[in-house]
Image (tube, helix red, strand yellow):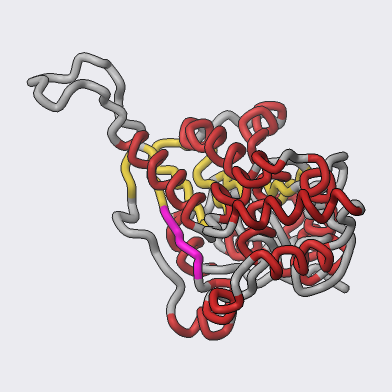
Amino acid sequence: MGFRHESVLLNETVHGLNIKPDGIYVDGTLGGGGHAYEICRSLGSKGSIVGIDQDAAAIEAAGVRLKDFGGKVTIVRSNYCDMKSLLHHMGIDKVDGIVLDLGVSSYQLDTAERGFSYREDAPLDMRMDTRQKVTARDIVNDYSEMELYRVIRDYGEDKFAKNIAKNIVRSRGKSSIETTGQLTEIIRQSIPMKYQKKAGHPAKRTFQAIRIELNRELDVLRESLDDMIDILNPGGRLCIITFHSLEDRIVKNAFRKNENPCTCPSDFPVCVCGKVSKGSIVTKKPILPGTEEQEGNSRSKSAKLRIFERS
C-alpha cells in the first residue's frame, strides 16, 4: 500500500505562511509531502524547503512526490524537536516559515501492522519512528495501574480511565496483551454500553492516549515551540495544525507567552522584568476546516490552525 495522506487545511496553511519566493521553509512533519509540495510551487529559483519526518514510509513517499523540485528540497529523517540543531548543521540559522501538521497520517492509521488503529487486529505497536525500541505493547503490559490511569485520563481525557486501567491490569495478569484487538475488547468491556452508543468508538481515546505517551507527542511539542519561534526571521511565520484539545492548548499558551512574555504584576506602571515580545499571534481564533473539507475528509473535523509571526 502506498503512503496516502490528505493534507488538512492545505490552502489555509500555505496562505498563512505568507511565502517569499526566495525564502527558506521547514515542514517539520513532512508526511506524504502535501504541504511541502504546495510550498515548493510558490518558491522561486533561490527558495528552498527542508522536510523532516521520523517515519521511513513518509520519507520515501515525500521523496517521490517532491522529486521534480530537485535541489530546492532537502529531506531528513528525524524528529522536529531536533530542528534547530539539524538546520545549524546545514548552515541555516534562520528560516522564513515553519509548518507542523500534528495529525497521525492516514497511511499510519490504515496500515494495520503499524498498530495505530483500533479497527484492525494487529500487534500493539504505534511507533511513529520504527527505530524506537519501546512499543505500545510495553506500555500496556509494563505500566502500573496508576500510570495507565494517568495516561488514559490525561491524554485520552476518558472519564472511564480508572476502569480501563484496572481491567487492563486484571487481563494481563492472566496473559500478556499482544494485539490491538485484545486491547479494544478490554476497553469495550470497561465502558457502559449506553455511553458507547453515543460517544463514537470506545477505544478511540485510550488508543490516542497510549500513542501520545509512547511517542512523547505533547512533551516534544511543548519543548520545541520556543526554539521554532527563535529561528524565524522577522516576518517569518509558524503555522501549526492540531487535532485535539491538549495540543491546541499547548500551542495557544506558547503563542500567548511569546507575544506577551512580561511577568510583571499588572499594577506595575512600567515593565521591569525585561522580557520582550517575540512577535504576534496572527490567528486570534484558530482557523477551522470548511464544511466541504469536513465532509470530504472526516479526519479533518477536529483540526485547528494557529499562526504566529515573528517580529
Residue nearest the viewer, comparing 249 with 158: 158
Going by the image, does 114 lie left or right of 306?
right
Residue nearest the viewer, comparing 309 with 252: 252
* Residue at x 69%, y 51% (from the top left corner): 166
* Residue at x 61%, y 61% (from the top left corner): 205
Residue nearest the viewer, comparing 213 with 66: 213
Q: How many marks?
A: 0
Viewport quadrant of the N terminus: bottom right
* Residue at x 51%, y 73% (from the top left corner): 301
* Residue at x 59%, y 65% (from the top left corner): 38
Residue 126: x, y in percent? 78, 54
* Magenta-colored span: 302-306
Viewport quadrant of the C terminus: top left
Residue 47: x, y in percent? 59, 49
State whether residue 154 is above or below residue 13. above
Dominant secondary structure of the magenta stretch?
strand
Going by the image, does 241 lie left or right of 103?
left
Q: Is residue 157 magenta?
A: no
State whether residue 120 is above or below residue 157. below
Residue 249 makes an appearance in the image:
yes
Residue 133: x, y in percent? 87, 39
State whether residue 160 is above or below residue 76. below
Residue 170: x, y in percent? 78, 52
Residue nearest the viewer, comparing 108 with 14: 108
Q: Residue furthest right?
A: 175
Going by the image, does 152 lie left or right of 180?
left
Residue 128 makes an appearance in the image:
no
